[in-house]
Image (cartoon, rainbow, N blue to C red):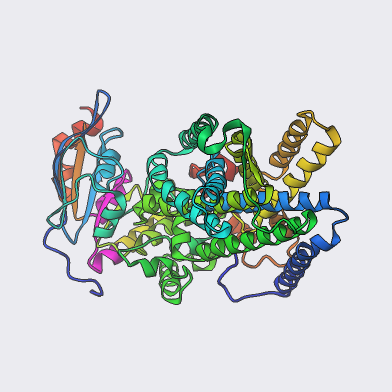
Amino acid sequence: MPSASSTRTGFDTALLGIKGLALVAAGVLVLAFPQLAPDAFILSVGVVIASYAALAVSWNFVGGFTGYISLGHAAYSGLGGYGTALLILEAGWNPWLSLVGSAVAVGVLALPIGFASLRVRGASFVIVSIALVLILLLVSQSWSDVTGGSNGLRVPRPFGEDVLRPEQHERFFYLHVGLIVIALAVWWAIDRSRFGTGLKAIREDEDKAQALGVPTFAYKLTVFVISAFFTALAGGMYALWFGSLDPIFQFSILVGSYMVLMSLLGGIRSLLGPVVGAVIVGYSLEYFKSAYGDTQFHLVALGLLLALVVLFMPDGVLPALGSLVDRIRPDKATSIREMTAAELVEKNKEIDEARREPEEVSR
Amino acid sequence: MTTTQAPPAVRSLETVELRKSFGGVHAVDGATVTFRPGKINALIGPNGSGKTTFFNCVTGMIKPDSGEVTYQGADITGKAPHRIAAAGVGRSFQLCRIFPRMTVLENMLVGVRPEGLLHRLRGSRNADDIAKARELLRRVGIDHLESSEARDISYGQQKLLELAGVLMTDPETIMLDEPAGGVNPALIGRIGTLVRELNAEGRTFVIVEHNMDMVMSLSDHVVVFDRGRPIAEGTPAEVQGDPRVLEAYLGI
């Protein structure tokens, strides 16, 4: 969090410069990616990673702000995909209108779902969130008149037949990037609002937040609906690109878990954490897939990677980088660690007397 | 005496026959209490006498099984905590609860009073709120820590932060659960002074506390709890001499 105090040191200015440069470089790299990609396959991997990033950023509206870990967000991406396809096929809507219409419908649907599931916390919430995906998987497999069942559902391409595959990939890559940028902008705006401060307080200590006057349930429900809306947009966008839907991939626990893992890996409390996580996980997944072929070994390798990150960077990659920077910061005038011997004695006394959280004592 | 606050209302917090059981344990067992408006009320009693459960019933953290809680004459029984906070009752928690991974200043900006949708969507760093937060941090003496993460400051400082955070909601009545618990004597003195100052501004206090020195020197009115209900009340001197109180504490 940037501090509101106006004492900016030379180190901070330099850091800001480096951050800005890195951001610009990353942005240029992303925009130039379709031109840099050597072939259509690599380009399609780029689209997949962008899709993962869009999903992870959307998930992080709930996960990052409130700390409620939903393993079932594939429900909303899946519904977004099927909704988009069905609005095109059955209602004859324009593809882009279908995409937005389906996301709005999913947002509305998320209201009663959130109303029911956000009443429980912690592990209970995780379990409840999974239930919906499993129900939707069964329904979409069985209701084959509408969804095509396990035969899948073909989604008409939004661009004409004359647009070739690489061109198709390129357009969808930019569309996904656009979606990510919009979602990030909304996340950023919430982060800076009083609404966002209330949400973060819920993540830290929900009862305490409510005692301070935060209408916790209304806040959680609102951000849950926002999250479902963006997840559905991402799911619909993927459907338009991929062109075919199968229940087993749309309503998959694995996809829901990817969103969680990517966000955790990148850092759920930072704006760009989920994007960084999606790039790392998405790239590794595709790499391991090509290295180990059709076996399920890529999942084992991915699991190992995540275990390592959780062991060494429990807060995620970006926060880990942040604290590394803090460690090399030359002046620590604002840090309470810089104190006189007398203050230290005082503080130790306080620590002894007070029952503190174990993690804090071990610091 | 500075009266920046509105003059204290005629009635403050009152409970009638409040009950709450957990399984077979009657944690609060028919408690009828009237706290004195504009005064520093203390709630004391042996461990397990139901003080904290009573506190939680009053502030909406748990729903009482039966009975009634009123604030300034309005029924607030079983209302959600944020509604009770909005009515003007602020509270701190036993063992001090702050938002550990938010900065001290951000901690301050969580507290809200009833406000419109537009205000909620407003930037949390708007000048009014920040000025108010800094003013309160200065008042409790931790303004130099505003950009530290709350988990990094000492326990005593966290206690002060919690108190300052409650003040952000501008409560007319402040309920403190063990404000002196786990802090050093110098800080106990500072917290006592703060309570006295805030009381002089017209705020009513209800304090659960085990530190008898603090209770006796600070409070105007003492309510003694035992087995989930008040067994005695009065001025500190009256309560100290009450045989029922001695029995409850010492078991004589």
Q: Is residue B209 in the magenta section? A: yes
**Residue placed most toward the observer, A69 or A289:** A289
**Identity of the residue drawn at 57% across and 46% down:** A81
Left-right relation of B211 to B147:
left
Residue furthest toward the right? A38
Left or right of residue B106, residue B180 in this image: left
- Looking at the image, residue B206 sits to the left or right of residue A126; the answer is left
Image x and y of residue A282, in percent: 73, 46
Q: Residue at x 37, y 48 (%)?
A: B93
Residue B29 lies in the magenta stretch: no
Q: Which residue occupies the foreground of this view, A222 or A349? A: A222
Q: Position of residue B178 (x, y in %)?
A: 35, 47
How many numbered markers are drawn? 0
Q: Where is residue A339 shown, x and y percent of the image?
A: 62, 61
Name the quadrant of the N terminus of chain A: bottom right
- Using the rendered image of the protein, determine whether residue B6 is visible from the camera's viewpoint: yes
Q: From what the image shows, is residue A259 above or below residue B217? A: above
Q: Nearer the viewer, residue B143 or A146?
A: A146
Residue positioned most to the top: B24
Residue B101 visible (yes or no): no
Q: Position of residue A184 (x, y in %)?
A: 60, 61
The boundaries of the magenta stretch are B196-219
Q: Nearer the viewer, residue B252 or A325?
A: A325
- Above or below for A252 versus B5: above
Q: Residue visible at 73% across and 64% down?
A: A329
Q: Quadrant of residue A78?
A: top right
Q: Residue at image x 49%, y 49%? A: A203
Q: Is residue A187 above or below residue A105?
A: below
Image quadrant of residue B113?
bottom left
